[in-house]
Image (cartoon, grey):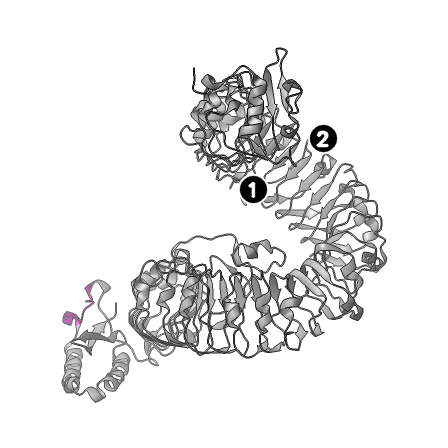
Amino acid sequence: MSAVSGLCVEDEQSLLLQLKNNEFKFHASWSTKLVSWNQSIPHCDWNGVTCNKEGHVTGLDLSSEAIDAELHNSSALFCLQHLQNLDLSYNIFYSSISPAIKNLKNLVSLNLSHNDLEGQIPMEISQLKNLVCLNLSSSSSLNLENPNLQQLVQNLTKIRYLYLDYIDISAQGKDWSNALLAIPSLEEVSMRSCNLSGPIDSSLGRLEHLSRLYLDNNHLLSPVPESFANLKKLTVLNLANCNLIGDFPQKIFEIATLSYLSLSYNFDLHGSFKSFPLNGSLQTLKVTGTNFTGPIPFSLFELPFIEHIDLSSNHFDGELKPNMLQVCRHLQTLDLSSNHLNGDLNLNMFQGCHRLQTLDLSSNHLNGDLNLNMLQGCQYLQRLDLSYNNLSADANIMDANLSSFPNLEILRLSSCNLREFPMFLRNQSQIFNLDLSNNQIEGVIPHWIWKILQVSGHLNLSLNSLTSFETHMLNYTINLDAIDIHSNKLNGKIPPFITSFFLDLSSNNFNTVIPHNIGAQFHSVHFLKLSRNKFHGDIPHSLCNIPRMYLLDLSNNVLEGTIPPCLIHSETLQILILGKNKLKGNIPNAFPKACDFFILDVQENQLSGFIPKSMISCTNLGVLNLGNNYISGYFPCFLRNLSLEVLVLRKNQFQGPIGCLENDESWPFLQIIDLAFNKFTGFLPAKAFTASELMMLNIELQHTLFSSEPYIVSSYSAGTSQYYSMTIVSKGREMVWDKILYSFTCIDFSSNNFEGPIPKELMNLVDLHVLNLSNNAFSGKIPSSIGNMKQLESLDLSNNSLTAEIPTELASLSFLSFLNLSFNHLVGTIPRGTQIQSFDASSFQGNKGLYGPPLTKIPNNGRPGLMLPPLASRNDHGIDFKFITGMEFGVIFGLAIIIGPLFFWSKWKIRYWKYVDDVLCIIFPQLYLDYQRHEGQWHPVLRWSR
C-alpha cells in the first residue's frame, strides 16, 4: 500500500470536503462549484462531481475555479481511487506534478492545462494505462526530458487525444515522430511551441486516425511530407511559424475532410494553388507571410463551406475578377493584402457576401473608383482596408450611406486620393481605428471626427495638408490610445484638448514655445513626438511630471537652454531624442541607478563638458548619439558594459587613444560606430570591435531594428527601439536613414590622427557594409584579407600614407559601389578585369605611382616604369640585387650617398623624405618608401611592392 493510500478513508465525501476546506484555496466570488459544496447534500449531487451507480466518485471537474494550491503527495485528491475523469484546468496550481498521480490508475481523462505547474513531468503518468485523453498544455514551466516524450507515452497505447502545448520537449524530428508513431490510435495531437526540431518524419502519414495536428511555433526547418495527403480523416492542420521550407504538396489541398489549414509565417515555404475540389470541406485557409505565387483560382471561392481566407503578404498575381466573390455565401474574412493583384476594383462583387466581416485588399495594384455605396449589402462588415492601391476617390464616397454598417470598427483608406473627409463618417459611432493618412485632404480637422471614435481608439491623419483644428473643439477632451497627425501643415499652439497614449504631432508648422504646463495636459501620454516643428524656448520641466512616459522626441526644433536634469533622472524613459536643436551646457550627470534608457540622442546641439559617469547605470542603452557637439574628454571606455548597438561621437573634441577596445568583451552587439572628426590618436587596436557579433557573422536577419510603424506601441514598452532615424555618411555623402536593418553595419574613423598599419583583424568583420578610415595617418599596405569583407558596399581609405599595390582581393568585393583610395602612396597597376576599373578616376588620384584604367595606361604621362622580375623572385623585405642593372644600382647608390647625412639632421629629415618619396615614385613606380621604427625614431627604408 502506498503512503497516500494508507491515509485514505472510505468516505469519499469527507475526502472532497478536505479538498475544499483544507487544501484548495479559492476565491469564493469566482467559484461556481466548490463554493456550493455542502455536507447536507449528497456529494454525488455536488456541482462538478460525477458518481457511478455504486456512489463512487468517477468524475471531478473543478476547472476555472481560481484554485490556488499545490498538488502535493499526501493530497486527498489521490485517494479517489475510482476517479476516471479529472479536470483541474484554468486554475493556479503550482509546484510540480506529484508522482502520486499514479494512484489514480482508473483515469481515462486527465486535464491539468493552463496552470502554473513546473518542473519535470513525472514518469508515473506513463503508468496510467487507461488514459484516452492527456492534456498538460500551457504550463510553460514544465519540461519533458527525463523521461522524454517516447518514454512517457510508450505504455499509453489507448491515448487518442494528446495535448502538450508550451512544454519544453526539445526533441529532434526522428524522436518525437517515432513517439507518435507508437500510438496508432491517435486522433488529436497538439504540440505547439514545444521547442521541437525537424525534419518531419514522412511516416506520420501512417497515423490513419489522425484528425487534428497542431505543430505551430516550432523550429522544424523541414519540408512538409507529401505523405500527409494520406491522412484521409485530417480536419485540422496547423503548421504556422515552423520555418518550413521547400514546396508545399498540392495533394494536401485535396483532402476531402480538411476544414482548417494554416501555413502562415513560413517565409521560405513555396507553393501555388491549382484548383480546389468542389466537394471539399475547407472553412479556413491561412497562408499569410509565405512564398506562394501565381493566380488565385476561382475554385477557392466556390468551396461550399469557405469562411476565412487569408492570403496576405505573398506573391499572388493575376486579376481579381468581379464574378469571383459572388458565390461566397458563407465568407466572413477575406484578406488579400500585400500581393500583386490587379484589375478594376468593383465593390459590387462583394454584395453577395452577406456575412462578410473583414475585407482587406490593401497594398495591391487594383484600380478604379472608390465607391463604398456598393458595399451596402455587407451589413456585418467590421473591418475594411483598401489602402495603397491605385484607386480614385469617387465623389459618391463623400455622400455614401454607411448607416447600414452598425458594426464597422476599422476603416483604412490610406493613399486613396481623398481630397476631403468622407461625410458618411458622421453617421458612425463605433469606429475604433480610422486611417485616412497619405491622402490630399486639406484645411481644418472637423470637430465631429473625434466624436465618432471609441474611447481608446486610433486615429491616423498623417501625411495630408491639414492646417488647423476646428476651434470649438476647445470644449472637448479627447481620450484615445493613438493620435498620429504627423507631416501636415498644422500651426499655432498645441491644442489643449488632445491627449492620448501615443501622440505624434511631428513634421508640422507649430511655431511657439512648448506650454509650461504640458506635463499636466499630457499626463496620460506614454509616447510623445513633437519633432520637426519650430518650437522654441526652453524645454519645460513639467515634462518630468508625466508618470509613465517611455518616448520623448523633441528633435529638429529651435529649442534653447539646457537639458532638464529631471528628464535624465527618469526611471521610465526609454527613448529620449533631443537632437538638432540649440541646447547648451552639459549632459546632466543624473542618470538613475534604475536607468532604463535604450536610445539617447542629443546630436547637433551646442553641448559641452564630458560624458557623465552616471551613464554607466544604463546597461540597456543601445543607441548613444552625441555627434556634432563640443563634448570633450577621452574615449568612453567606462561604458564598455553597456549593450550598445549604435555609438556616434562624430564632430566633437574627443582625444587620446582608444586602446581599451582591445578587450574582446566590449559591445558584442555593436553595428554602427562613428568617431569621425575628433582628435583620437595612436594605433588602432588589433581587436577593436571584433567582438561585434553583427559585424563578424555573415547573417542576413529578416526583421527591422528601427521602423516607424506608428501603432505598434506595445513594442516601445518592451524596451526595444521600433522608432529611430539617423544620419550616416555612406558612399561619400550624408544620408538620413529612417529604417536601419539589423544587418546594416558601419565603421567611420575618418578625420582623426590614427596612425600605423590597418589591423588585419579588422578584415574579419565580414558583415561590415561601410568602412571609412580616410584623413588619418595610416601607413603600410592595404591588407589582402580585405577580400573577406564580402558585404562591403562603401570603402574610403583616402588621404592616408598607404603604400604598395592595391591588393587584387579587393576586386572580389562584388557589392562595392563606392571606393576612394585617393591621395596615398599606392603604386602599380589598378587590378584589371574587375569592377574596380569602373570607378571614376577621382577614386585613385593623388597616387603618383598608380596607373591603369581609369587612370593613364602608363604612369606619369607616358614615362615608362621600371620592368620588374617575376613575382616569385621578389623580396618583401628589401631589393633583390640580382635583377638590378648596373645603372639602376648606381642611381640607388648615388642617392644613398646624398641622403645619408640627412639621417642625422632631424629638422629637415621628414620634409626631405616626403620629397624623395615623390621623386622615387616617378622614377621607380614599383619602388616605394616605407618606414621602420628603431630606438624611438622612424627611419626610411626602400622596398619593392609585390
The three-letter code of the residue at mark 1 reads His
Q: List the single residue furthest toward the front.
A: 40
Residue indicated by mark 1: 270
Report x, y in % for residue 180.
49, 25
Residue 588, above or below 372? below
Where's the N terminus, which quadrant? top left
Q: Nearer the viewer, residue 329 or 22?
A: 22
Query: Which residue corresponds to the image point at 58% horizontal and 62% vertical from the top-left?
Result: 549
The three-letter code of the residue at mark 2 reads Leu
Residue 501 visible in the shown view: yes
Residue 770 visible in the shown view: no
In the visual, does 588 lie left or right of 766?
Answer: right
Residue indicated by mark 2: 278
Q: Which residues are magenta?
A: 873-883
Choose top left, top right, bottom left or bottom right for residue 884.
Answer: bottom left
In the visual, does 880 lie left or right of 304?
Answer: left
Residues packed near mark 1 inside 10 Å, few (<14), some (14 to 19) or many (20 plus)? some
Query: Which residue corresponds to the image point at 30% horizontal and 69% vertical from the top-left?
Result: 805
The secondary element bearing badge 2 is classed as loop
Report x, y in % for residue 523.
64, 63
The secondary element bearing badge 1 is classed as strand
Report x, y in % for residue 94.
50, 35
Mainly helix, strand or loop, the magenta region? loop
